[in-house]
Image (cartoon, grey):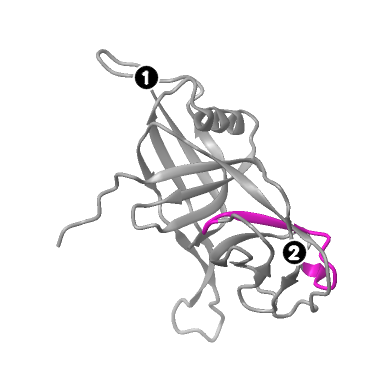
Amino acid sequence: MSGVQAQGTTLHIGTGTGGAITITAISKAFNAEVTGTHALTVGDRVTFATVGGMTQINGLTGTVRAVTSTTAFVVDIDSRAFTTYTSGGTATPVTWTEVLGIIDYSPSGATVSEIDTTDLKSTAKEFMAGLTDNGSFTINYKYLEDDAGQAACRVAGAGSLTKSFKITDPLSNVYTFSGHLSSYGAVPSAGVDQVLKGSQTVRISGAVVVS
């Protein structure tokens, strides 16, 4: 069997916010459906504010899991236990900047912690699964002085800022997550008969949403 070419994979970093979407309805569901005219795509992130009735959603940031129409989208927020939506509210999207010049990236992979549940009645060590640590991923790129995406990464690294990131692969799978740069190319590397290069490592914080 042949594999899938990596060509066409893109990385975006969140660099700001777009115009707020006016909400007219939010469903009570495992993945809440939001009604409001929008131009969102799968993998985008929105932050909710000033929602009436379903006030528990205010201040939460959700990732778009599906776009059902130009007036409705689904986010990864479980609203089943929230109070019923009554009126108003906005969903403000993250704006993305593509990071250009990427040569390759390598995720470390996720690990699950172990909780020791052994007691004096145990006949052998006993454990249960704990929280998932989604690890980190390292990006190698050719250094582009004027690329806005690389510049945004350098600013995030220097300022110890947590940012949203979005990877889209050639199969249209979108991986959205938050993280900070635990290391970054403040100074590019150089070699004979080579272009300037850089690297950065993003430490993932929280869940990775796959859409």
Looking at marks 1 and 2 on the same chain, the residue that comes earlier in the sequence is marked by 2
**Which of the 4 image quadrants contains residue 73?**
bottom right
Q: Residue at x 40, y 50 (%)?
A: 108
Considering only vertical position in the picture, is 35 above or below 40? below
Asked if the residue under mark 2 is in contact with the one under mark 1, i.e. CB atoms within 8 Å, the reply is no
**Alpha carbon of mark 1 to alpha carbon of mark 2: how far?**
47 Å
Q: Nearer the viewer, mark 1 or mark 2?
A: 2
Q: Amino acid at mark 1?
A: Leu
Q: Where does residue 33 sit, x and y in percent of width and height?
A: 64, 72
Q: Which residue does the numbered mark 2 point to in the structure image?
A: 23
Q: Amino acid at mark 2?
A: Ile
Q: Nearer the viewer, residue 168 or 107?
A: 168
Which residue reaches farthest top? 192
Q: Is 52 one of the magenta-colored residues? A: yes
Q: Residue at x 54, y 27 (%)?
A: 151
Task: Decide: few, some or many residues near mark 2? Use Cα within 10 Å; few <14, some 14-19, many ≥20.
Answer: many
Considering only vertical position in the picture, is 17 above or below 25? above
Q: Secondary structure at mark 2?
A: loop
110 horizontally vs 30: left or right: left
Considering only vertical position in the picture, is 127 above or below 98? below
The magenta segment is 41-56
Q: Where does residue 8 sit, x and y in percent of width and height?
A: 34, 45
205 horizontally vs 190: left or right: right
Q: Where does residue 78 sit, x and y in percent of width and height?
A: 65, 73
Q: Where does residue 198 sit, x and y in percent of width and height?
A: 41, 26
Q: Which residue does the numbered mark 1 point to in the structure image?
A: 196
Which residue reaches farthest bottom? 121
Task: Decide: few, some or many residues near mark 1? Use Cα within 10 Å; few <14, some 14-19, many ≥20.
Answer: some
Considering only vertical position in the picture, is 104 above or below 90? above
10 horizontally vs 129: left or right: left
Q: Is 138 one of the magenta-colored residues? A: no
